[in-house]
Each structure stands twice: as structure tokens, then as C-alpha cells.
Amino acid sequence: MGFKIIYCIRCKNEISIPEFGTSEKEEILNHVRENLPLYAIQFVKIKKHLDLSSSKAFVQHLNAKKGICHRCNKEISLEENVVCSRCKSFNLNW
């Protein structure tokens, strides 16, 4: 199983980013958008065999709305992996 590790300047954590299929991304995002992050964390933990803290860090950096920073709500680039120019937080922009 391949994954990237990206460092978030804002929270000073390494974020493990596993590879996900389209349906897995949709399921995770549905949980995030429905304000059910614990379900998203559990899904990532089970499906990708990450520990709890890595799964939590991953989910915390997902954007509920594409193109909007998960932390400060500033508009950001539509690239998949992007750092917000305002708050310097890493964003998984799915």
C-alpha cells in the first residue's frame, strides 16, 4: 500500500496520505460533510491500517468544501494537496 507523508507547517504534524479509490474518497467526504469525523477516522483506520493519531490527523486536514481551507475558510487552489496562504495549514482538497 503506497502513501505520501506531508508535513503541515501549521499543526507541526506529519500527515500520512494513503491512496484511496473514488468510492472510498466519497465515503470519507460524506462523513466529513455530515459532521461525523469519528466515522471518517474509523474508516481510514480500518481500511488503510493507520493508527488512531495518523487517521485523525488525516481527517482533520480534509476540506469539507473543495477549494475552501479546512481551518480558516479562505479560498485556496483546487489542487489536491495545497497549503493555505493565509493560515499555512495543509489541506487535502478532494
Image (cartoon, rainbow, N blue to C red):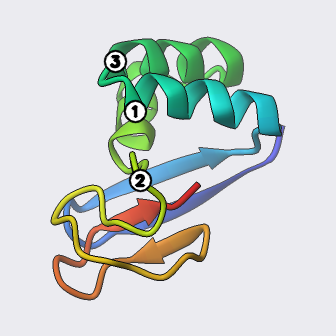
Residue annotated with mark 2: 65
Q: Nearer the viewer, mark 3 or mark 2?
A: 2
Residue 73 picture location, percent across and down: 21, 65
- Which structural element holds mark 1? helix
Residue annotated with mark 1: 33
Seen in the image, is 9 located left or right of residue 21?
left
Q: Amino acid at mark 1?
A: Arg
| Discs 1, 3 touching: Cβ within 8 Å | no
| Discs 1, 2 touching: Cβ within 8 Å | yes
- 10, above or below 33, in the image: below
The mark nearer the N terminus, 1 or 2, is: 1
Seen in the image, is 76 located left or right of residue 43?
left
Q: What residue do we see at 27% from left, 69% from top? A: 89
The mark nearer the N terminus, 3 or 2, is: 3
Q: Amino acid at mark 2?
A: Lys
Give the quadrant of residue 91. Answer: bottom left
Q: What residue do we see at 60% from left, 49% from top? A: 17
- 64, above or below 50, in the image: below
Residue 83 picture location, percent across and down: 38, 77
Give the quadrant of residue 46. Answer: top right
User: How many labels were placed on the picture?
Assistant: 3
- Residue in front for this viewpoint, 43 or 52: 43
- 71, above or below 64, in the image: below
Q: What residue do we see at 27% from left, 88% from top? A: 85
Give the quadrant of residue 43. Answer: top right
Which corner quadrant holds the N terminus? top right
Residue 21 is tagged as: none
Residue annotated with mark 3: 36
